[in-house]
Amino acid sequence: MMRSMIAALAVVAAGLWAFGAVASAEDKKEVKLTGTLVCGKCGLKMTPKCSNVLQVKEGDKTVNYVLDDKGNGEDYHEGVCGDGKIAGVAVTGTVSEKDGKKYVKATKVELPKK
């Protein structure tokens, strides 16, 4: 009786673990966002340090995605720091949300061709 209960619990635990792994994989689906790149500190006053934020039009709203990157250490940051903007930037990565802010862990950042 005890062995069958332990075996049943092990099966349930394994099932929940597998379901969690699938759910996590689906949550981390890579997306491509296109918008205007701005500095989170200089342009938007929403981050304490210089950062890269992609502003994306979603319907009639503008949604800010903070890039999870090297901030002002990125080559493309020079074009946005000091209230600059770069329109037509495409960012590919996984989106997450923390403290009411949206973040994107960028795997690819494509600037418009000059």
Image (spheres, rainbow, N blue to C red):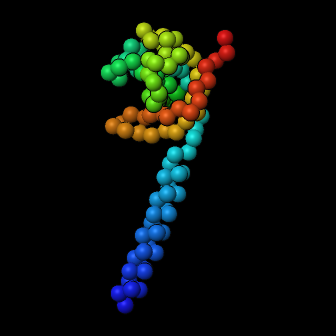
Q: Residue at x 56, y 45 (%)?
A: 29
Question: In the rendered image of this protein, does residue 27 appear above or below residue 18?
Answer: above
Q: How many marks?
A: 0
Question: In the rendered image of this protein, does residue 91 appear above or below residue 94?
Answer: above
State the residue in front, 61 or 22. Answer: 22
Residue at the far bottom in the pictured view: 1
State the residue in front, 43 or 109. Answer: 109
Q: Residue at x 47, y 27 (%)?
A: 69
Residue 93 visible in this rendered orientation of the protein: yes
Q: Quadrant of the N terminus?
A: bottom left
Res 70 quadrant in image: top left
Q: Residue at x 54, y 51 (%)?
A: 26
Q: Quadrant of the C terminus?
A: top right
Residue at the far right in the pictured view: 113
Estimate the x, y position of residue 78 in percent, counting from the top left: 49, 11
Estimate the x, y position of residue 112 in percent, counting from the top left: 64, 18
State the residue in front, 99 or 8. Answer: 8
Estimate the x, y position of residue 59 in percent, counting from the top left: 53, 32
Q: Is residue 44 left or right of residue 89?
A: left
Question: In the rendered image of this protein, does residue 94 appear above or below residue 63?
Answer: below
Res 47 quadrant in image: top left
Q: Residue at x 39, y 86 (%)?
A: 3
Estimate the x, y position of residue 19 in percent, counting from the top left: 49, 62
Residue 33 visible in this rendered orientation of the protein: no
Residue at the far front in the pictured view: 3
